[in-house]
Amino acid sequence: MKFSKQTLQKLKNKHKKLRPEKYKKLKRESLRGSIKGNSMRPRLSVYRSNQNIYAQIIDDINSVTLVSCSTLDRDIKLQNSNGRTCAASKLMGKKLATLSLKQNVTKIVFDRGPYIYHGRIKSLAEGARIGGLEF
């Protein structure tokens, strides 16, 4: 089910009828409808919580996770004690890029989910670009 931006805005304004969880799900599904990953260009999916950030590279056709990484990983946690900073997200993007290059994945499709391309999401993408991934 794909909605236009105007329809999503109307649904968001009717906050009594549509709860934030449902709005978030509709927004994610409308974005996910246009983004698909395959074996040539897998999808980089991002999940952001209040404490940490998680990312994984997924081949949607074969339903396989190729690489996953988070700010809870030992290497990143030793360098940054706090996982909710942009610096930690950038380090994680670089680590994700090195792990994916070992799997011979250089080109990806970026799936930011329902999150705005700003802050930790943006720094993760920049770190992945610095590490060698092409979006």
Image (cartoon, rainbow, N blue to C red):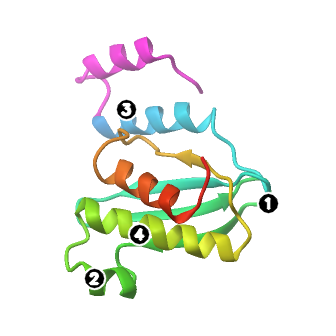
Q: Left of 110 or right of it: where is 124? A: left
Residue 92: give its label.
4
Which amino acid lies under the numbered mark 3 shown in the image of this protein?
Tyr
Quickly name the residue at label 1.
62
Give the spatial CA distance, label 3 vs label 4: 29 Å
Residue 118 lies, with reference to residue 12, above or below; the image says: below
- Labels 4 and 1: the sequence-earlier one: 1
Residue 53 in sight here: no
Q: Secondary structure at mark 4?
A: helix
Secondary structure of residue under mark 3: helix
Of the residues under marks 3 and 4, which one precedes in the sequence? 3
The numbered mark, 1 or 2, whose residue comes first in the sequence reads 1
Amino acid type indicated by mark 2? Gln
Question: Magenta region: which residues?
Answer: 1-19
On the image, which quarter does residue 66 sit in?
Answer: bottom right
Q: Nearer the viewer, mark 4 or mark 1?
A: 4
Q: Which residue is mark 3?
A: 23
